[in-house]
Image (tube, rainbow, N blue to C red):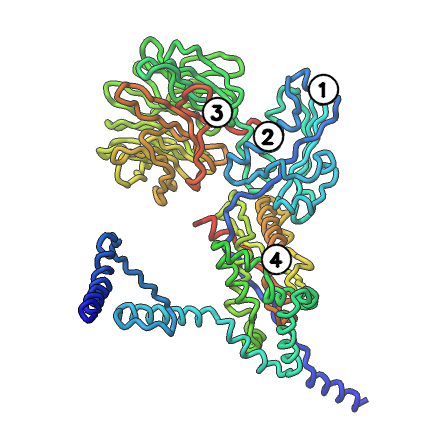
């Protein structure tokens, strides 16, 4: 026995069993390239196709829904939707069980498949999100709605997939309210208009008899506040989009302007100007009580609440030049936060709460930028001849604003268009509208 | 006769001397453009350009420095026979090389027998593509670097893990594969630790998320998105660029994906 033990010990020493500590490698960088995603056409049987063609005058609703998703993702700048011509697998088979090798062959990292059915006057749309590299299903959902809502279904699917792959809520099932403009610069007809965020389904809310400006969405419902003229005085209005009922907000002796809702939608904050002085006021929409927030001989305007409702940002010329300030929601503790060169205006608090977007005028150029709520980390995202009025997407990633072009010597060439830009500053895109457009405001997500 | 021969001689002389001169006149010579081809090699003599000579010497020195910083692959070949004293194998290699020249069809069979990384040494289509496409040059360089690891380096790694160049090559590969989800909250802990089990060729046998329990915690939904993106990066990148030797050492590997730096910046 002893010999055996000694032998074992000897073997142990002669042939040592090498053991290594686990090697760790830190990966602290990645790429920010758009994620390649394959969006297969949503399959449907012939009877569904025929019935929906009769009803909606759309040849293939499944294909059109996939195009809505594709367009949303391309506009976001975070995804690279792959060309459908390169797809090797048929939509209906892919929806049952994708052949992942075929999809990874075309470099897809994610895949969306789906199916559209029509029965009992209802449109049923189901979709699946697949992780191509891991060869597994990531998500599967179905929606039932009236057939005419098919575009919205595309937006909702986009939001669900966006959230699953990026970790933040989407912004596709949203609408934008803006001022539609027509005619020469000196005689513009301005109407209040609303459309889906991708530029479809435009509807006009006013006739264009009165000048309308600065429409803003209520973050909690389908109410809108805007500026229009009442007895030749600019006044703040409230409009219920669903009922079409509108009313003047408050009975102020002077002019009211730059309205915006509080985050809970129960108050309106706005500027009230009288005798050359402009201060910030709020009005409770339930009991109509008006409260004065600032009291300063300078011009205080463009107020915007923080998402928690505890703070307000606004611009004021109390320092001699127009700059951005923040204060508590009761008007106390006013602090100036912008100290850069130039003039700062139209501050808007991000729905995330971390940034404030603004318009900056410096050396004859207009900039749209963002800064942290303490004024640090100023980043100018875009520069142009004239642009202003940024409005945040509900997830705080994208800003929409409007840009005007220069009029030539003949007084022609003027145009006003909506543009969007994301926080990286690289993904700047024209938002298509039927007419010229200005003063956009982004709604909250219509479905949560 | 003497006079006529004298005249003939004179005529011939005039013709030989003056005619080329006359013929040259109408030719419009283009202005001289001096084209001096300077080859930057050891054999080049540039006696009239001492400054250029100095510059070339400087460039050479810098090139030498760069090469030495990048762990020259040439040294590897020299060290191999010293570290692995198997004269028979060396002889075989020489024979194989000779065969390649004579009968290229045989190469394919041989390539199949060696490991993935040795394949690249002999014939790597990616490297050829990289030569054409400048954007791939850096990748190609890292390929070569990782492929040729000296035995002496390997011995060091037994103690200290991967060498810097090996780690850099692996990192560079994964950086290219990892699409960071941009919506992650950058003020949260964005570290995902993934343990890998690897094959000798760098392909992944098994992945394990070390903080798996965090995935199902309330308010940590973003962690799932982050972890999945890291797993996709590993899948996309495999086979991973691992050293050709010392498999026992790196067959289990832990990758710590941290998105915070990228999202904050």
Report the chain holding disc 4.
B
**Mark 4 and mark 3: Cα distance apart in space:** 42 Å
Q: Earlier in the sequence, mark 1 or mark 2?
A: 1
Give the mark, 3 or 1, whose residue is nearer the N terminus. Answer: 1
Whether residue A126 is situated above or below residue B15 in the rendered picture: above
Helix, strand or loop at label 4? It is: strand
How crowded is the residue under tag 2: few (<14 C-alpha within 10 Å), some, or many (20+)?
some
Report, in whole angstroms, how far the alpha carbon at label 4 lies from the one at label 1: 50 Å
Callouts 2 and 3 on one subunit:
yes
Residue A228 vertical position relative to residue B56 in the rendered view, above or below: above
Residues at marks 3 and 1 on the same chain: yes
Q: Chain of mark 3?
A: A
Report the disc number at residue A176: 3
Q: Which residue is mark 2?
A: A67
Dot in front, 2 or 4: 2
In the displayed structure image, the side of residue A381 where residue B149 appears, left or right: right
> What is the x, y in percent for residue A29?
50, 54
Crowding around mark 3 (Cα neighbors within 10 Å: few <14, some 14 to 19, many 20+) is many
- Asked whether the residues under the numbered discs 4 and 1 touch, taking CB atoms below 8 Å apart as contact, a structural biologist would say no
Q: Residue at x 43, y 50 (%)?
A: B265
Q: Mark 3 and mark 1: span between their CA atoms? A: 33 Å
Q: Write down the quadrant of residue B115 in the picture.
A: bottom right
- Cα separation, mark 2 vs mark 3, equals 20 Å
Residue lying at 67% horizontally and 36% vertically, measured from the top left: A113
Residue highlighted by disc 1: A50
Instruction: Please tell me if label 4 and label 1 are on a single chain.
Output: no
Q: From the viewer's perspective, is B135 left or right of A311?
A: right
- Helix, strand or loop at disc 3? strand
The answer to whether residue B88 is visible is yes
Tell me whether circle 3 and circle 1 mark residues in contact (CB < 8 Å): no
Nearest to viewer (mark 3 / mark 1)? 1
């Amino acid at each position: 026995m002893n010999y055996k033990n000694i032998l074992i010990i000897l073997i142990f020493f002669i042939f040592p069993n090498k053991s290594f500590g686990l090697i760790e490698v830190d990966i602290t960088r990645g790429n920010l390239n758009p994620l390649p995603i394959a969006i297969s056409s949503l399959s449907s049987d012939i009877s569904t196709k025929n019935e929906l063609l009769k009803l909606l005058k759309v040849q293939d609703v499944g294909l059109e829904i996939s195009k809505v998703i594709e367009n949303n993702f391309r506009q976001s700048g975070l995804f690279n939707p792959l060309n459908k011509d390169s797809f090797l697998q048929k939509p209906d088979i892919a929806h049952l069980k994708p052949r992942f090798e075929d999809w990874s062959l075309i470099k897809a990292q994610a895949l969306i498949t789906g199916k559209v059915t029509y029965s009992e006057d209802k449109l049923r749309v189901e979709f699946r999100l697949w992780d191509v590299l891991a060869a597994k299903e990531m998500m599967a959902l179905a929606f039932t709605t009236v057939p005419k809502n098919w575009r919205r279904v595309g937006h909702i699917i986009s939001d669900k997939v966006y959230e699953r792959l990026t970790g933040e809520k989407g912004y596709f099932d949203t609408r934008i309210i803006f001022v539609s403009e027509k005619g020469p610069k000196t005689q513009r007809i301005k109407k209040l208009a609303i459309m889906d965020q991708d530029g479809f389904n435009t509807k006009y809310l006013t006739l264009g008899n009165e000048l309308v400006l600065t429409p803003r969405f209520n973050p909690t419902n389908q109410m809108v506040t805007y500026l229009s003229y009442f007895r030749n005085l600019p006044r703040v209005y409230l409009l219920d989009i669903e009922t079409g009922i509108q009313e003047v907000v408050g009975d102020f002796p002077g002019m009211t302007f730059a309205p915006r809702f509080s985050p809970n939608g129960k108050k309106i904050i706005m500027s009230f100007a009288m005798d050359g002085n402009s201060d910030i006021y709020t009005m409770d929409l339930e009991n109509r009580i008006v409260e004065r927030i600032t009291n300063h001989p300078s011009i205080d305007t463009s107020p915007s609440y923080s998402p928690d409702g505890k703070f307000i940002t606004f611009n004021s010329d109390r320092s001699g030049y127009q700059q951005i300030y923040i204060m508590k929601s009761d008007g106390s503790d006013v602090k100036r936060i912008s100290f850069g060169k130039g003039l700062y205006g139209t501050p808007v608090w991000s729905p995330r709460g971390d940034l404030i977007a603004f318009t900056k005028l410096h050396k004859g150029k207009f900039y749209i930028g963002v800064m942290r709520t303490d004024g640090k980390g100023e980043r100018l995202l875009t520069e142009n001849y004239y642009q202003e009025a940024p409005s945040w997407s509900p997830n705080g990633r994208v800003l929409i604003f409007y840009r005007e072009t220069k009029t030539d010597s003949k007084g022609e060439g003027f145009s006003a268009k909506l543009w969007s830009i994301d926080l990286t500053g690289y993904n700047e895109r024209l938002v298509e509208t039927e007419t010229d457009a200005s003063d956009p405001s982004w709604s909250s997500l219509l479905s949560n | 006769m003497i006079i006529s021969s004298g005249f003939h001689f004179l005529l011939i002389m005039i013709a030989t001397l003056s005619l080329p001169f006359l013929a040259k006149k109408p030719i419009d010579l283009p202005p001289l453009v001096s084209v001096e081809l300077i080859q930057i090699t050891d054999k080049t003599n540039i006696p009239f350009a001492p400054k250029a000579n100095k510059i070339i010497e400087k460039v050479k020195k810098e090139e030498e420095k760069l090469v030495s910083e990048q762990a020259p692959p040439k040294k590897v070949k020299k060290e191999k026979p010293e570290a692995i004293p198997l004269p028979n194998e060396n002889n075989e290699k020489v024979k194989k090389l000779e065969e390649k020249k004579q009968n290229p069809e045989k190469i394919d069979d041989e390539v199949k027998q060696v490991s993935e990384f040795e394949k690249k040494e002999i014939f790597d289509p990616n490297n050829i593509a990289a030569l054409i496409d400048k954007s791939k040059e850096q990748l190609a360089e890292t390929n070569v670097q990782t492929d040729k690891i000296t035995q002496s380096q390997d011995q060091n790694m037994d103690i200290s893990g991967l060498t810097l160049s090996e780690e850099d090559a692996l990192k560079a590969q994964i950086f290219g594969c990892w699409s960071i989800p941009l919506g992650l909250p950058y003020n949260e802990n964005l570290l995902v630790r993934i343990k890998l089990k690897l094959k000798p060729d760098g392909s992944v046998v098994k992945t394990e998320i070390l903080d798996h329990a965090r995935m199902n915690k309330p308010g940590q939904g973003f962690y799932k998105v982050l972890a999945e993106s890291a797993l996709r990066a590993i899948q996309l990148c495999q086979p991973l660029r691992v050293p050709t030797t010392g498999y026992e050492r790196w067959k289990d590997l832990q990758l710590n994906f941290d998105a915070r730096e990228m999202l904050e910046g």
